[in-house]
Amino acid sequence: MSTPKIKEEPAATEPAAHSNDAQDQDVEMTDAAEQGVSTPVTEEEHTHREDEEGEAEKSPEIDYVAESKKIEEKAKMYLARQTKPVIIPAFAAWFSIDDIHEIEEISSRVLQQQLEVQDG
């Protein structure tokens, strides 16, 4: 049996040469507009355009006092009024994170024993 011969094609260099010719030509900025291609917008031009649009479509001034009163009225509809004073003790005077109370040590040991019984 004979082995089939593989037909080798020459490398396509013509399209690359053609694209280089197009790149070598100078292109003016007006050409892009005539072809319908948009040119990139700089950040300065973008903010300038936003300013012009903002002037045309000015939003009405917001009355923050009136808005806060509306929100308070809605909150009053759903919240209950507090009728008795609530005293919250300050724990900082006697609380220490370094000290473990005897009751906490006992409850911790009891909890560990219960978990060991359940697991074992």
Image: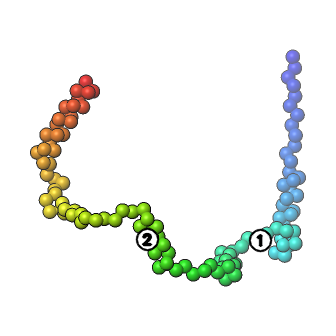
Residue 118, given in percent of the width and then of the height, sits at 26, 27
Q: Which residue is mark 1?
A: 39
97 over 68 or under it: above or below: above
Q: Position of residue 105 (x, y in %)?
A: 14, 42
Identify residue type, mark 2: Glu
Q: Is residue 30 left or right of residue 76?
A: right
Q: Which residue occupies 85% across, 23% down?
A: 3
- The answer to whether residue 15 shows anywhere in this view is yes
Outermost residue on the left side: it is 102
Which structural element holds mark 1? loop
The reply, left or right, for residue 8 in relation to residue 43 is right
Measured in 3D between alpha carbons, the distance from the residue under mark 2 to the one under mark 1, in whole angstroms, is: 51 Å
Q: Is residue 24 left or right of residue 104?
A: right
Count neighbours of disc 2 (C-alpha within 10 A) and say few if under 14, some if 14 to 19, many if 20 or more.
few
**Label 1 neighbour load within 10 Å: few <14, some 14-19, many 20+:** few
x then y, percent, for residue 24 = 84, 66
x and y percentages locating residue 78 in the rendered image: 42, 62
Q: Which residue is mark 2?
A: 72
Q: Amino acid at mark 1?
A: Thr
Q: As displayed, is residue 89 above or below residue 52?
A: above
- For residue 40, what is the image quadrant? bottom right
Q: Residue furthest top?
A: 1
Above or below — where is 53 with respect to 83?
below
Q: Residue at x 45, y 70 (%)?
A: 73
Location of the N terminus by quadrant is top right
